[in-house]
Image (cartoon, helix red, strand yellow):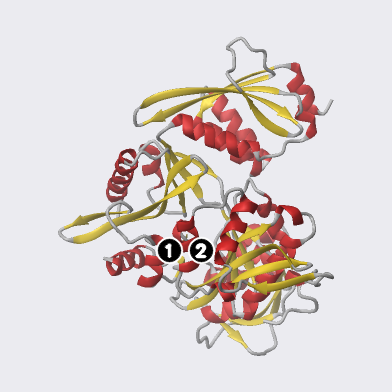
């Protein structure tokens, strides 16, 4: 079952920035007290897994709540069925409330339809240790392109060749232009929270050659991760 | 990657006299669990500790759990969880999650949190982490303190909650609100809160009266209907939760939300001159 769960998760969130999850890891963080019907609900069609949700009991002094560590579904109907199963189980187990912290996933409205109140309570905060290695991991072989020096405040400049659809980190080379920014702006662009144009107009990014704005735009497009998937169970 | 000049993440990293960082020793697991519960008051159950510390794969308490000592006393600490993350091209990078940072109540205000946080960042860099993650509550101090250690807010996950027992949930909210500190200008203000809940068992309304004293919210027992209060707020639980979170997410968001909820009559309030004076600082 765990293999099926991981396959489904990887299929649904294949393009998202996410953590690698092995079966051992899944079991440890999602179902530590032995997976059984009380904390794992699934929806299947013709024997094929369409969705699953894992939840666990948390105690806040005298209050008992179910924390939904992950809910992953192929479509809106499946998500609704999973929520119904969790709510039924919660009523049966006499908990005081049920909560889930959502990544930017589809079918957000299903929770509202099922009577959940939605608000912001947490932030995912990120720090950048090694931008060169990060860009190197996204690097591919590029023959033709402009060379830019990416200068992130506090780090050594990174020489990158920018092609039509990708980037290549270089050990050295004479850059055609220099792009300067801070790590906050870089991270927000990397994770698709903002656009290059917006940050350029806000003067959080400076470009040495105004004629090369399209090249810089291509660079950020190549590194950008539009979606992320770090469900609550992965927060450890 | 070597940074230019001084390392900005660890620029204040100087071991103070009498301060020492070490990792948790085997056999100290129970003491660590007790320390977390003492500092967080409470942190959580033994099962949760096992989930995060004992069962977690690729995790060793003797390598990932840092302890800060002040003159030989256990003053605080923090934990690093290492993971691999997948980028859009399916290649992997090492990332780390910082968490469970705590300071023993007797050692607060001495820079112990700072030492622990910098220690975790150093450990992460040594282990080849490219990115570091933290998941603080926006209502608590770490969300404000973490930028000092290089962390920036990137995502705001939405929390969805279904209340099954309104009394208990209200009690939970009150307990959380009691931990918050309000500016002194609000001292002496009496507030009545009337919250309606739409539960699977039907609608419920809960009423509470609170007094702000020494910057803290205290619930007054058994409020009378005709009790004179400075501010009465009547709303739905969903709107209340959104309003509270908007306080932390910027004035513009808060004003828009208040306007929309008031116009839709999902939020009603009545206030005295005392409230206006308090807000204006008169």
The percent position of residue B75, horizontal first and vertical second, equals 72, 62
Q: Residue at x 27, y 53 (%)?
A: A37
Assign the C terminus of chain B to one quadrant of the image.
top right
- State how many labels appear: 2
The percent position of residue A211, horizontal first and vertical second, equals 67, 71
Chain assignment, label 1: A
The percent position of residue B77, horizontal first and vertical second, equals 66, 64
Label 2: state its secondary structure: loop
Q: In this rendering, does residue B281 appear at all?
A: yes
Mark 2: few/some/many CA within 10 Å (<14, 14-19, 20+): many
Q: Which residue is mark 2?
A: A236
Q: In this rendering, does residue A14 appear at all?
A: no
Label 1: state its secondary structure: helix
Q: Which residue is mark 1?
A: A29
- Picture disc at residue B227: none
Q: Is residue A81 left or right of residue B164?
A: left
Mark 1: few/some/many CA within 10 Å (<14, 14-19, 20+): many
Q: Nearer the viewer, residue A95 or A172?
A: A95
Callout 1 touching callout 2 (CB < 8 Å) = yes
Q: Residue at x 49, y 63 (%)?
A: B52
In this rendering, is residue B53 above or below B264? below
Q: Which comes sooner in the sequence, label 1 or label 2?
A: 1
Chain assignment, label 2: A
Q: Residue furthest left?
A: A46
Q: Residue at x 76, y 57 (%)?
A: B107
């Amino acid at each position: 079952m765990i293999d099926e769960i991981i396959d489904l998760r990887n299929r649904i969130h294949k393009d998202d920035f996410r953590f690698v999850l092995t079966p051992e890891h899944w079991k440890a963080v999602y179902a530590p007290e032995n997976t059984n019907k009380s904390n794992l609900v699934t929806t299947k069609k013709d024997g094929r897994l369409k969705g699953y949700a894992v939840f666990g009991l948390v105690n806040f002094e005298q209050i008992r709540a179910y924390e939904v560590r992950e809910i992953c579904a192929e479509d809106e109907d499946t998500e609704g069925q999973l929520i119904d199963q969790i709510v039924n189980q919660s009523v049966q187990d006499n908990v005081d409330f049920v909560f889930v912290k959502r990544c930017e996933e589809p079918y957000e409205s299903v929770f509202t339809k099922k009577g959940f109140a939605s608000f912001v309570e947490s932030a995912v905060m990120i720090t950048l240790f090694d931008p060169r290695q990060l860009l190197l991991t996204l690097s591919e072989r590029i023959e033709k392109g402009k060379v830019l020096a990416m200068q992130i405040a506090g780090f050594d400049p990174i020489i990158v060749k920018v092609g039509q659809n990708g980037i290549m980190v270089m050990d050295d080379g004479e850059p055609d232009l220099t792009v300067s920014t801070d790590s906050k702006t870089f991270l927000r662009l990397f994770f698709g929270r903002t656009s290059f144009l917006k940050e350029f107009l806000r003067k959080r990014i400076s470009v040495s050659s105004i004629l090369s704005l399209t090249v810089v735009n291509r660079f950020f497009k190549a590194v950008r991760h539009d979606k992320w998937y770090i469900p609550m169970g992965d927060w450890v | 990657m070597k940074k230019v000049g001084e390392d900005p993440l660890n620029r204040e990293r100087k071991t103070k006299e009498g301060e020492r960082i070490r990792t948790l020793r085997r056999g100290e697991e129970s003491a660590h669990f007790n320390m977390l519960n003492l500092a967080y008051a409470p942190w959580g159950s033994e099962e949760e500790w096992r989930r995060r510390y004992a069962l977690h794969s690729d995790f060793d308490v003797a390598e990932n759990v840092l302890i800060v000592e002040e003159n030989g006393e256990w003053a605080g600490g923090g934990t690093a969880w290492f993971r691999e993350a997948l980028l859009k091209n399916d290649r992997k990078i090492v990332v780390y999650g910082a968490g469970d940072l705590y300071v023993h109540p007797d050692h607060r205000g001495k820079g112990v949190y700072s030492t622990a946080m910098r220690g975790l960042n150093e450990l992460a860099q040594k282990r080849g982490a490219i990115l570091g993650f933290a998941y603080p509550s926006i209502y608590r101090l770490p969300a404000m303190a973490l930028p000092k250690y290089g962390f920036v807010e990137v995502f705001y996950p939405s929390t969805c909650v279904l209340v099954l027992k309104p009394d208990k949930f209200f009690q939970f909210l009150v307990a959380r609100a009691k931990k918050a500190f309000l500016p002194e200008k609000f001292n002496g203000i009496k507030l009545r809160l009337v919250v309606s809940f739409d539960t699977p068992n039907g609608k419920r309304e809960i009423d509470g009266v609170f007094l702000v004293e020494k910057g803290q919210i205290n619930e007054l027992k058994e409020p009378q209907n005709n009790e004179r209060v400075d501010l009465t707020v009547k709303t739905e639980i969903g709107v209340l939760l959104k309003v509270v979170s908007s306080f932390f997410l910027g004035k513009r968001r808060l004003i828009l939300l208040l306007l929309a909820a008031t116009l839709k009559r999902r939020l009603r309030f009545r206030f005295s001159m005392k409230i206006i004076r308090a807000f204006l600082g008169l």
